[in-house]
Image (cartoon, helix red, strand yellow):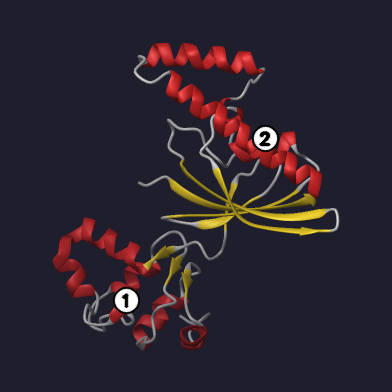
């Protein structure tokens, strides 16, 4: 499973404080890159020892206050004594790496250092999208985040192979816009856990609509939702 996550970080506040934040991020990046260069070729044990010594040197307790993925300035708007800033960020947030999100991540550390600024953060990865809010900036999945029909297809590949997929889906329509009327794909989808994004569907049979009417997880387009709504609450 991929852990690559993209971030859009909006920060707003007094111009002088925004300038101090940008200087801090640049200094942090410079210090971290210098340490990386200095420890190239060292063993994992030697790097760990150097890392702990460096944290102590800078008076830091959390690794994310020193390690950085780096942020890019996407947009800056200056007003009278006030600035709106948009930063971009990316991280591979696996268990071995420091994260941008979460209570031990970079954003939480940034907030502790600059608590008077206003933060609005959006993220997206391969499987979900949502927001991160201070003070801990934990990922909060939005209602838009859902398993897509492509994700369901992958599950079917694992479950029964390519032939299962071909027998369950009309592969001749772009982006699976309709379901094979002779298969039980709608029944199988309706039983899956988690939200399933089927807004690409433009056609539903009565049989499929009845199955989807029983599932609270299926997300449909307004047009298809009208079709399904006829059967909600009915046996």
Residue 208 found in image quarter: bottom left
Residue 167 at x, y = what percent? 18, 74
Q: In x, y percent, where is residue 226?
A: 51, 87
Q: Which mark is residue 24?
A: 2
Q: Earlier in the sequence, mark 1 or mark 2?
A: 2
Front residue of 113/224: it is 113
| Viewport quadrant of the C terminus | bottom left
10 Å neighbourhood of mark 1: few (<14), some, or many (≥20)?
few
Q: Compared with residue 59, is residue 184 higher up or lower down, i.e. above or below?
A: below
- Camera-side residue of 28 and 145: 28
Residue at disc 1, secondary structure: helix
Residue at the image position 47 percent from the left and 11 percent from the top: 49
- Badge 2 local density, few (<14 within 10 Å), some, or many (20+)? some
Q: Is residue 23 above or below residue 148?
A: above
Classify 58 as above or below 146.
above
Residue toward you, 72 or 163 = 72
Q: Please name the residue that numbered disc 1 is placed on.
A: 175
Q: Is residue 107 left or right of residue 175?
A: right
Q: Nearer the viewer, mark 1 or mark 2?
A: 2
Which residue occupies 43% across, 56% down? 127
Residue 42 drawn at (x, y percent): 36, 15
Q: Position of residue 154 (x, y in %)?
A: 28, 60
Q: Quadrant of residue 57?
A: top right
Mark pair 1, 2: CA separation: 45 Å
Circles 1 and 2: CB atoms closer than 8 Å:
no
């Amino acid at each position: 499973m991929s852990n690559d996550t993209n971030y859009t970080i909006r920060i707003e506040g007094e111009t002088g404080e925004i300038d101090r934040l940008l200087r801090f991020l640049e200094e942090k990046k410079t210090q971290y890159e210098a340490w990386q260069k200095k420890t190239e070729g060292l063993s994992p044990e030697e790097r760990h020892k150097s890392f702990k010594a460096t944290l102590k040197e800078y008076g830091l307790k959390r690794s994310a206050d020193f390690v950085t993925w780096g942020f890019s300035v996407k947009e800056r708007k200056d007003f009278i004594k006030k600035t709106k800033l948009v930063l971009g960020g990316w991280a591979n947030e696996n268990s071995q790496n420091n994260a941008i999100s979460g209570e031990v991540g970079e954003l939480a550390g940034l907030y502790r250092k600059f608590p008077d600024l206003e933060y609005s953060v959006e993220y997206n990865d391969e499987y979900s999208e949502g927001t991160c809010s201070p003070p801990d900036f934990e990922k909060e999945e939005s209602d838009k985040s859902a398993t897509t029909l492509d994700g369901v297809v992958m599950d079917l590949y694992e479950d029964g192979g390519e032939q299962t997929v071909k027998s369950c889906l009309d592969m001749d329509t772009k982006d699976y816009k309709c379901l094979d009327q002779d298969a039980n794909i709608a029944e199988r989808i309706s039983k899956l856990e988690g939200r399933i994004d089927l807004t690409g569907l433009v056609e539903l049979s009565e049989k499929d609509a009845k199955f989807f009417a029983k599932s609270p997880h299926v997300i449909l387009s307004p047009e298809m939702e009208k079709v399904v709504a006829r059967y909600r609450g009915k046996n």
